[in-house]
Image: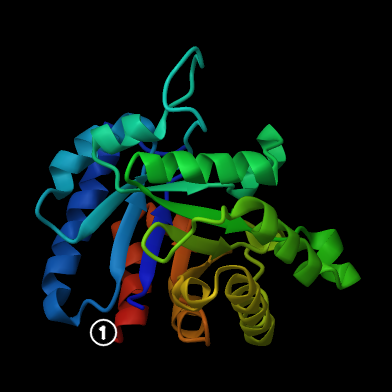
Amino acid sequence: MRPLVAGNWKMNGLSASLAELGSLQDGLAVLGLRLGSDVLVCPPATLIAQAAWKVAGGAVALGGQDCHAKDSGAHTGDISAQMLKDSGASFVIVGHSERRQHHGESDGEVAAKAQAAWRAGLKAIICIGETQAPRYAGDANQICGKQLDGSVPGGATPANTVIAYEPVWAIGTGKTPTSADITAMHAHIRACLVRRLGKGGREMPILYGGSVKPDNAGEILNLPEVGGALVGGASLKASDFLSIIRAISGS
């Protein structure tokens, strides 16, 4: 499995921010054959079409941060997976913890969005992860297993799906689980995927997301079963994001 390093810009970025994509593209060109991962940036939907022109012919893929479960219809303010595809996206994040928390998205809704992504020809990055209370109560495995069962549709394959594990209590807090914690959870996720999906579950990438920064990326990205990273704030600056990419490329 080739690792994936994905940047989630969240609700950040205007047209001027596309200069960072240009710098990222230049940095990846310097790495050339030493680039050891696939690279994805998920800007706001307003920037995807412009970003597609900016990165055309280079190593950066583009993704959306969410999509509606329906392909079209009377859903004012929403965006469909087909619209993302038409704008130049090849991935979409679904079930991010901020969507689950602030918009009340259920596992079933996340699964429906993943299926919409597949219909549009997008690869779905399905996010799961526990909050602080179940982590401290020793229920993290149970919570994440339940989310996997409910959020990952039966048709999931390594060709159409990536899993992203986010310890919710670590996102944007500067806190990071220990290497042992990350290794244990990724092993648990792998076991759950194999149980549900068989061979496909053994090959499906599992990203780690949660305060990934240049100074901890090397350690995290080289842990067993960590197939890349979902990076938040550190993906907004090309220099920081490149440092994380170099950590997995060994450059």
**Residue at figure coordinates x 30%, y 34% from the top left:** 47
Quick check: 125 above or below 36?
A: above
In terms of depth relative to the viewer, which is nearer, 60 or 105?
A: 105
Q: What amino acid is labelled 1 in the image? A: Ser
**Residue at figure coordinates x 32%, y 57% from the top left:** 40
**Residue at figure coordinates x 38%, y 40% from the top left:** 119
Q: Decide if residue 20 is on the left or right side of residue 191.
A: left
Q: Quadrant of residue 128?
A: bottom right
Q: Decide if residue 165 is on the left or right side of residue 104.
A: left
Expressed as whole percent of the image width and height from the top left, the position of residue 61 reads 26, 54
Q: Decide if residue 132 is on the left or right side of residue 228.
A: right
Q: How is colour applied across the structure in the image?
A: rainbow
Quick check: 132 above or below 249?
A: above
Expressed as whole percent of the image width and height from the top left, the position of residue 133 reads 86, 60
Residue 64 visible to an observer of this rendering: no
In terms of depth relative to the viewer, which is nearer, 156 or 65?
A: 156
Which residue in the rendered view is the most extreme toward the right? Answer: 137
Within-10-Å neighbours for mark 1: few <14, some 14–19, many 20+: few
**Residue at figure coordinates x 63%, y 73% from the top left:** 189
Expressed as whole percent of the image width and height from the top left, the position of residue 139 reads 85, 68
In terms of depth relative to the viewer, which is nearer, 233 or 107?
A: 107
Expressed as whole percent of the image width and height from the top left, the position of residue 20 reads 26, 50
Image quarter where the N terminus lies is bottom left
Query: Label 1 belongs to which residue?
Result: 251
Looking at the rendered structure, the secondary structure element under dot 1 is: loop
